[in-house]
Amino acid sequence: MELLEINNLKYKNIFEDISFQIKSGQFITVSGGNNCGKTTLIRILSGQFEVKETIKLLGTYVEEYPQNLWKEITGTIIPQDNPEFLFDTVEEELNYVIHLFKKTEEDKKETYKEIIKKYKLTKFQKKDPNMVPIFIKIKMLLAEKMLATPQILFLDDICQELEEKEQEEFIKLLRTLQLETKIAIIMTTSNLNISLESDYLLVINDGKILLEGEPLTVIEKDNTLNKIGLDLPFMVDLSVKLRDYNVVDKIELNMDRMVDTIWK
């Protein structure tokens, strides 16, 4: 049984026929041009927008789950929707959420130490959480969601405002959490570089899935992606062009290996 199944999703004039599945521990990215419905998809999957007899979690339609149980099983981060943090410091904010899930004082203290280390928040502990950089806010939101030990995580274009190094760190963190907890992740993104780090890529256009599959295989469809306004990652674009001229025979994502291949 799949963890999550979406069958023939139709929603207003945005989606005509969207179907896909996600297994436990799988990392799926969803991409597409502007206004293709990426955020709407996350809102539907997270239960903010209602559909009937379309989405199953562990074989049960989502509308049959009590709201509190659905929130335990899933975690959602849509950056533009998240309200201000409630407390004066990062430390107070995290400890408040930790207290909701951990019973003993020892567990609470140990969990706080683990979060500070894993999410690299040490030097921000005494800072106002509403005044820290966006990357720190996002890591705090992720840490708080993970405390509930969800089985699936919905993320909407969460890397959009991050710098390249921050994006790399965040994806590495997601992969660590995925390995440790077997959590499934569905993340929308307009950045195909980020999609390369996922297990499976869906490209949406005109209310349907235009392309899907292993990310590198999908991204090689450069003409199709360019037509809907998506830019290829630099190394993929370069590899495709060099392959057309018979300089290389495959896609190479590492610049040093690309140089070595050319000089040979």
Image: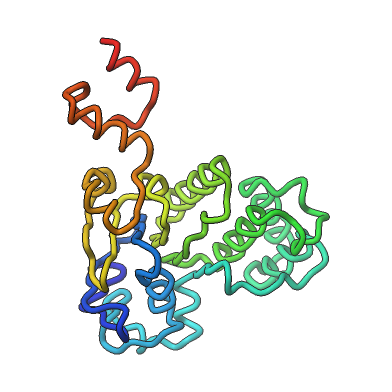
The image position of residue 82, as x and y in percent, is 61, 72
Would you place residue 250 above or below residue 220 in this image? above
Which residue does the image show at 24% across and 34% down from the upper left? 240
Residue 153 location, quadrant = bottom left
The image position of residue 1, as x and y in percent, is 23, 68
The image position of residue 231, as x and y in percent, is 36, 48
Which residue does the image show at 54% across and 42% down from the upper left? 164
Would you place residue 123 above or below residue 95 in this image? above
| Image side of residue 97 versus residue 41, left or right | right
Of residues 142 and 166, which is closer to you in this image?
Answer: 166
Which residue does the image show at 39% across and 25% down from the upper left? 255
| Image side of residue 252 versus residue 78, left or right | left
How many marks are shown on the rendered structure? 0
Q: In the rendered view of the protein, which quadrant contains the C terminus?
A: top left
The image position of residue 162, as x and y in percent, is 57, 50
Of residues 67 and 237, which is closer to you in this image?
Answer: 237
Which residue does the image show at 56% across and 40% down from the upper left? 165
Of residues 26 and 232, which is closer to you in this image?
Answer: 232
